[in-house]
Image: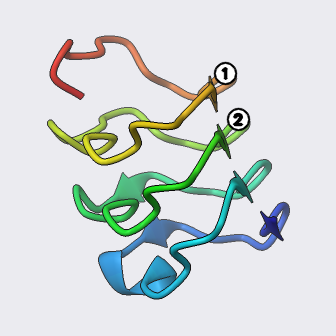
Amino acid sequence: QLNLNSNLLTSLKHSYFTNLINLTILTLRNNSLYDVDKDAFIDLNNLRRLLLSNNKITILKKGVFRNLNRLEQLDLSENGLSILDRDV
């Protein structure tokens, strides 16, 4: 489990989570995230919970969650998402 709540993060890049292949829970609540790289979660094959609530995410790039085959919970509440493409 990795808890990065309330750290004033504004972006998530691919390099932030490399080599964390056994991570199952990633919590990024209450930051100022607005930019999420399309490969930010590419190495997190075992992730089961991804909590991104209370940020400033308005757009998610196509395929950003493509490698999260074991994901059971995704929380995007309290963001500014208006349209979510089905290929996200």
Secondary structure at numbered mark 2: loop
The residue positioned 68% from the left and 24% from the top of the image is 78
Q: Position of residue 19 (x, y in %)?
A: 47, 87
Q: Residues within 10 Å of mark 2 (few under 14, many from 20)?
A: many
Q: Position of residue 85 (x, y in %)?
A: 19, 16
Residue 46 falls in image quadrant: bottom right
Q: Amino acid at mark 1?
A: Ser
Q: Is residue 48 left or right of residue 54?
A: left
Name the residue that disc number 1 marks: 77
Residue 3 falls in image quadrant: bottom right
Dot label at residue 46: none
Q: Is residue 73 left or right of residue 37?
A: right
Which corner quadrant holds the N terminus? Answer: bottom right
The residue positioned 28% from the left and 62% from the top of the image is 37
The residue positioned 31% from the left and 62% from the top of the image is 42
Q: Is residue 23 above or below residue 19?
A: above
Q: Decide: marks 1, 2 in contact (CB < 8 A)?
A: yes
Secondary structure at numbered mark 1: loop
Name the residue that disc number 2 marks: 53
The residue positioned 77% from the left and 48% from the top of the image is 29
Q: Is residue 1 left or right of residue 70?
A: right
